Amino acid sequence: MVIKVFLASSSGSTAIKKKQQDVVGFLEALKIDYAPLDIASNEDNRMWMRENVPGEKKPTNGIPLPPQIFNEEMYCGDYDTFFEAKEDNTVYEFLGLTPPPGSKEAQQAEKAQKLHNGSGTEEDLDDDTTKKDLVEAEQNGDAHTEEDSGEKAETDAQEENAEEKEPAEEDEESRKVAEEEEQEEGEEDRAEDDLVSEEEEELRELEEEEEQASEED
C-alpha cells in the first residue's frame, strides 16, 4: 500500500506550505513511505484529488486544498484530521497502516484489544476482586440484619409474654386481697353478732331480776 500526499509545490499560501511541510516531515520521521503528488504542475493529479475527496470533506466552494492524504484509493483525511491523529498517537490508524511493534500506538491498540476480548489486566482483576468483596460484604450485612431482626423479634415476643404474665399475676394478687378482705369482714360480722347476743342476754337477766324484785315487794 502506498500513502499518497497531494501537495502544491508552487502554492503562494504560507499556511498551506507550512501544513504540507508538517505532514511530510512527520511521515519521514516515522519512516513511513509515501508518494508526493504535485497538483500544481500535474492536471491529472489535481483532478483526481478533487474527484476522490468525499463531498462532506470538501469546503463550501467544492475545491479541496492541499495537503490531502490517501492510502491508495482510500481517503484518509486532510491536514486537520492528520493533526488530530498525531495528537492522539493514532497516525498509523489514520493512514490505515499497522503500527510497528513497540510504538505507543501499538501498545494502545494491544491494550484496547485486550479490553475488547475481556482479558482483564491486574487493575481489572483488582476491580473484580473489589466488586466481589463488596458483594460478600453486602451479603454478610444482609445476614447480620436478618439475625438482628430474628433476635429483636424474639426479644419482643419475650417482652409481650412478660407483659401478659404481669396482668395475670396482678389479677391473682387482687383475688387474694379480696378474699382476705371478705374473710376479715366475715369475722367482724361474727364478732358483732356475738356482741349483740351478749347484750341481749344481759338485758334478759336484768328484766328477770326486776320481775323477781317486784314480786317480792
Image: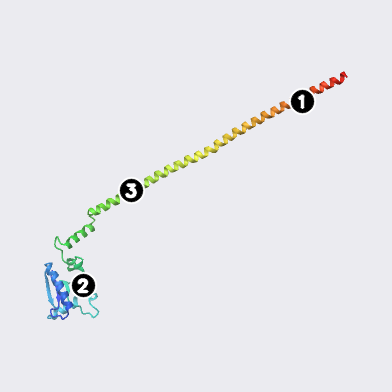
Amino acid type at image mark 3 = Ala
Amino acid type at image mark 2 = Asp
Quarter placement of the N terminus = bottom left
Give the Cα distance between marks 3 and 1.
94 Å
Residue designated by label 3: 137
Residue sitting at the far top: 216
Residue sitting at the far right: 217
Quarter placement of the C terminus = top right
Quarter residue 67 falls in: bottom left
- Vertically, is 17 above or below 115? below
Q: Earlier in the sequence, mark 2 or mark 3?
A: 2
In this picture, residue 213 sits left or right of residue 169:
right
Visible in this render: residue 78? Answer: no
- Vertically, is 180 above or below 113? above
Give the Cα distance between marks 2 and 3.
51 Å
Could you tell me residue 62's position as x and y percent? 22, 79
Quarter residue 36 falls in: bottom left
Residue designated by label 2: 80
Looking at the image, which is closer to me, 196 or 155? Answer: 196
| Mark 1 closeness class: few <14, some 14–19, many ≥20 residues within 10 Å | few
Residue designated by label 1: 200
Give the Cα distance between marks 2 and 1.
138 Å
